[in-house]
Image (cartoon, rainbow, N blue to C red):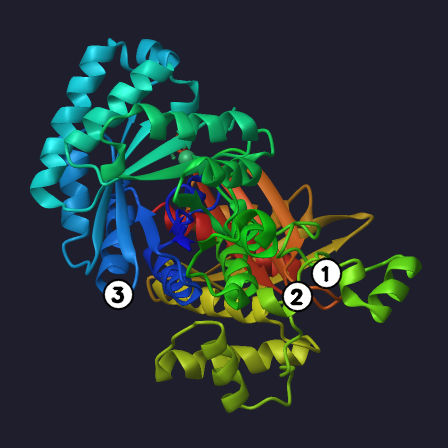
């Protein structure tokens, strides 16, 4: 049997999805869950990108012990040094160096000739070698790179110490037959290729990322880059759960491969990533969508009752989709809550658990059943409130079909309580105008959305906003059973991220 290395880039390429940004604390929560899931490599971030990302990589490196922890770098000295510093405490550190190689990138992005690109790669890898034994190299936009040049770049990277050669389909341009033949041509034309593992990194611009990744494995790739729920730049990356379940389900095609993923953790991981990023999983999403194992038509239902496998190729229990045995509601006690939090991979100290228990009881008074997503949102809210500058204390809104909406908000900021009222074009606009009076920040609301976190009329609403302040675009999110409260929290979250 041959091993397929699962390289998870949810915290790097996944987090590059506009609006998906995570705090260092949230990244660590996801990293712990990825460790439980059995990912081999966690790409924790791009340390040079921001101090926040540097801290996130550093924190994952210090705390995650089983997985290889990886940081991304361009072929730039400062990038490589930032990865080194952020991974100093990692048990198994890896640097991922990338360099664009396609004609279009050379001409417009770099304005460099092929030989200059080879020199730049050589320079960066030599530098990386001073700090790292485990080096991964990506010729960015590989699928649109002229083949002979790609072979030369790959050969150079292996000569300079890269142990993994990752082939990115950066713009999701390739298709399955093409990508498997590209991988096998690399295996056949790069003389030193047996000193490296070939990896694949696919994007979903044409909806082919999972198919392309599987095809690359058939062509000879033994590491696959993927993200939970397929989140990532633009249309996203290849989805971890789809690749893993395809490998497992189609033993006839992929029987010679194995990987370390505990598939029973897939749904839990998906929920956590969805709640923390605010990226709702579509109901029809393969493997982890709410409808993935639901049967509506009578013919299907009848057949499934007779034999489940008539219309189900995967047992929902195998991906952790089984119903929770414990229903959490207002009668549930502290032990049940702690057990569920533990089950969700949420490690809280006693003080935080007390707070969450109090908030849980308040929520249970408003909502019949508390779902996992509610708990994750609650924990997130609680962690955020402790750190944030502006804290929403209360909100009162008067609105109706024939009246101009009026909102009064009370906010705590730097230990002082501020109150303001405003009218607006709608109740949300009135809230935001009242908040603006307190914060005295000039903002422009770019996008606003509201989704239900769970099912049912009493579901919590998750509001997401994108605001523009002083030329900067900032995202925020907030959850509550009251949608106006959720909206106000999202707005304040964005303002707090402004720093
Ligand atoms: O899509 C891409 O090319 C990337 C590289 C940094 C590997 O994400
Ligand atoms: Zn990518």
Q: Which-is-in-front pick, marks 3 and 2? A: 2
Q: Where, by quadrant of the figure, is residue 157 drawn?
A: top left
Question: In the rendered image of this protein, does residue 451 appear above or below residue 155?
Answer: below
Which residue is situated farthest in the right direction here? Answer: 298
Label 2 vs 1, first from the N-terminus = 1
Label 3 vs 2, first from the N-terminus = 3
In the figure, is residue 221 to the left or right of 120? right
Q: To which residue does mark 3 refer?
A: 65
Label 3 vs 1, first from the N-terminus = 3
Q: To which residue does mark 1 refer?
A: 293
Badges 2 and 1: C-beta atoms under 8 Å apart? yes
Image location of residue 348, percent across then percent down: 38, 77
Image location of residue 270, percent across then percent down: 54, 58
Image location of residue 185, percent across then percent down: 39, 25
Alpha carbon of mark 2 to alpha carbon of mark 1: how far? 7 Å
Q: Nearer the viewer, residue 203 or 433?
A: 203
Question: In the rendered image of this protein, does residue 322 appear above or below residue 62?
Answer: below
């Amino acid at each position: 049997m041959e091993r397929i290395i699962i390289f998870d880039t949810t915290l790097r390429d996944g987090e590059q999805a506009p609006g998906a940004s995570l705090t260092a604390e949230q990244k660590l929560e996801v990293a712990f869950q990825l460790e439980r899931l059995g990912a081999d490599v966690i790409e924790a971030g791009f340390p040079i990108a921001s101090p926040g990302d540097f801290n996130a990589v550093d924190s994952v490196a210090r705390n995650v012990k089983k997985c290889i922890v990886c940081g991304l770098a361009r072929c730039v000295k400062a990038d490589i040094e930032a990865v080194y510093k952020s991974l100093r405490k990692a048990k198994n550190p890896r640097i991922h160096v990338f360099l664009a190689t396609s004609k279009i990138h050379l001409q417009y992005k770099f304005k460099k000739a092929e030989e200059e690109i080879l020199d730049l790669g050589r320079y960066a890898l030599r530098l990386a070698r001073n700090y790292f034994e485990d080096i991964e190299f990506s010729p960015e936009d590989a699928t649109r790179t002229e083949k002979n040049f790609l072979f030369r770049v790959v050969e150079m990277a292996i000569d300079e110490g890269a142990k993994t050669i990752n082939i990115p389909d950066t713009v999701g341009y390739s298709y399955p037959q093409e990508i498997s033949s590209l991988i096998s041509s690399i295996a056949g034309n790069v003389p030193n290729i047996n000193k490296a593992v070939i990896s694949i990194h696919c994007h979903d611009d044409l909806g082919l990322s999972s198919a392309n990744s599987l095809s690359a494995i058939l062509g000879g790739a033994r590491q696959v880059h993927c993200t939970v729920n397929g989140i990532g730049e633009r249309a996203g990356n290849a989805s971890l759960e789809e690749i893993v379940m395809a490998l497992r389900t189609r033993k006839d095609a992929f029987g010679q491969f194995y990987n370390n993923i505990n598939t029973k953790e897939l749904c839990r991981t998906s929920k956590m990533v969805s709640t923390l990023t605010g990226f709702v999983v579509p109901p029809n999403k393969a493997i982890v969508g709410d409808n993935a194992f639901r049967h509506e038509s009578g013919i299907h239902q009848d057949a499934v009752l007779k034999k489940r496998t008539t219309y189900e190729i995967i047992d929902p229990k195998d991906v952790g989709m089984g119903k929770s045995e414990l229903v959490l509601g207002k009668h549930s006690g502290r032990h049940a809550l702690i057990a569920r939090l533990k089950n969700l991979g949420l490690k809280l100290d006693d003080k935080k658990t007390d707070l969450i228990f109090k908030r849980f009881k308040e929520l249970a008074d408003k909502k019949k059943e508390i779902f996992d997503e509610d708990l994750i949102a609650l924990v997130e809210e609680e962690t955020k409130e402790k750190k944030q500058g502006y804290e929403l204390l209360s909100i009162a809104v008067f609105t109706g079909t024939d009246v101009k909406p009026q909102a009064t908000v009370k906010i705590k900021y730097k230990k002082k309580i501020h109150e303001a009222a405003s009218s607006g074009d709608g109740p949300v606009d009135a809230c935001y105008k009242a908040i603006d009076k307190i914060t005295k920040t000039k903002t422009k609301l770019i996008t606003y959305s509201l989704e239900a976190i769970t099912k049912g009329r009493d579901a919590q609403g998750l509001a997401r906003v994108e605001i523009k302040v002083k030329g900067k675009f900032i995202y925020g999110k907030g959850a509550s059973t009251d949608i106006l409260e959720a909206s106000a929290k999202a707005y304040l979250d964005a303002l707090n991220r402004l720093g």
